[in-house]
């Protein structure tokens, strides 16, 4: 008799638990349904829950229009951040421009131009007094960000020349990695042909890795094609320095 009583009590408890769980599930289901109905009602032209297939189709169409509007708004927001960054750069406010570019990247993550400009701003911020304070730890972080930004821009658009020149400058003059700069500068000159400034940077990179023959060839190319007398003189002086030091 005692066993039957315990069995009966256990069964009652099980039923109570099942009912409670079922009640909670039903309550949540009703709440979710009511929430969905309320959302659909807001989209309904007549401000009532749609009751027919045509009403549902109309609600879906309105909802899709809202989604498309949101997409357009997000894209436009990215453009605004990009424009703001350009204005800040024009005024020399590169730290503020970098913050704006971070937002632009958030909205337009596959825009190679935004990543390139972030590389430019980060490189300049790295050299500022703000970044180089307290031992230069911040400077290294910004140089790393600059490198990653240039590389991302190149990854997104392999024929975009400016980030290749930017990362060449970064590797040669800031990070002391001329061997990494050379392929980017070569590709840049393939895309832009006769950029004398880039040739000077490439010649310097060759010199830094002890490739004097290529450095001489690059200076000779500058002397041949440059219309700027000062640059021709500079190239001739650099060329002569190499000849005197290593071939004299």
Image: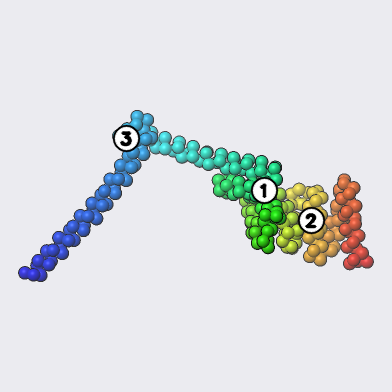
Q: Is residue 123 visible?
A: no
For residue 135, above or below residue 60: below
Residue linked to disc 2: 201
Nearer-the-camera pick, 163 or 82: 82
Q: In this image, 189 relative to 57: left or right?
A: right
- Which of discs 1 and 2 lies nearer the camera? The answer is 1
Q: Secondary structure at mark 1?
A: helix
Measuring from the top left, give residue 8's x and y in whole percent.
11, 64
Image quarter of residue 173: bottom right
Quarter location, residue 36: top left
Q: Mark yes or no: residue 241 visible.
A: yes
Whole-percent x, y for residue 9 in the image: 13, 63
Query: Gap between marks 1 and 2, in whole Å?
Result: 24 Å
Residue 81, picture quadrant: top right
Query: For mark 3, what is the residue?
Result: 49
> Callout 1 environment at 10 Å: few (<14), some (14 to 19), or many (20+)?
many
- SS assignment at label 2: helix
- The label nearer to you, 1 versus 3, is 1
Q: Are marks 1 and 2 in contact (CB under 8 Å)?
A: no
* Residue 8 falls left or right of residue 61: left
Q: Which residue is mark 1?
A: 94
Give the position of the N terminus as an image quadrant.
Answer: bottom left
């Amino acid at each position: 008799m005692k066993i039957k009583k315990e069995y009966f009590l256990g069964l009652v408890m099980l039923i109570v638990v099942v009912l409670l769980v079922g009640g909670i599930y039903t309550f949540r289901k009703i709440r979710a349904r009511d929430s969905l109905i309320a959302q659909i009602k807001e989209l309904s032209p007549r401000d009532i829950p749609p009751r027919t297939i045509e009403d549902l189709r109309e609600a879906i169409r309105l909802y899709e229009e809202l989604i498309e509007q949101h997409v357009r708004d997000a894209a436009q927001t990215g453009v605004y951040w990009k424009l703001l960054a350009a204005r800040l750069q024009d005024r020399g406010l590169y730290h503020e421009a970098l913050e704006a570019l971070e937002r632009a990247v958030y909205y337009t993550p596959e825009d190679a131009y935004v990543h390139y400009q972030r590389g430019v701003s980060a490189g300049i911020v790295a050299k500022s007094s703000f970044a180089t304070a307290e031992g230069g730890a911040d400077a290294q972080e910004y140089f790393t960000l600059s490198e990653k930004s240039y590389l991302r821009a190149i990854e997104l658009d392999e024929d975009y020349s400016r980030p290749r020149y930017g990362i060449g400058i970064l590797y040669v003059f800031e990070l002391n990695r001329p061997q990494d700069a050379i392929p980017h500068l070569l590709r840049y000159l393939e895309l832009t042909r006769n950029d004398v400034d880039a040739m000077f940077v490439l010649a310097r990179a060759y010199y830094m890795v002890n490739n004097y023959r290529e450095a001489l060839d690059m200076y000779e190319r500058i002397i041949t094609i440059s219309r700027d007398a000062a640059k021709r003189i500079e190239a001739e002086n650099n060329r002569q320095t190499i000849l005197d030091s290593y071939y004299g």
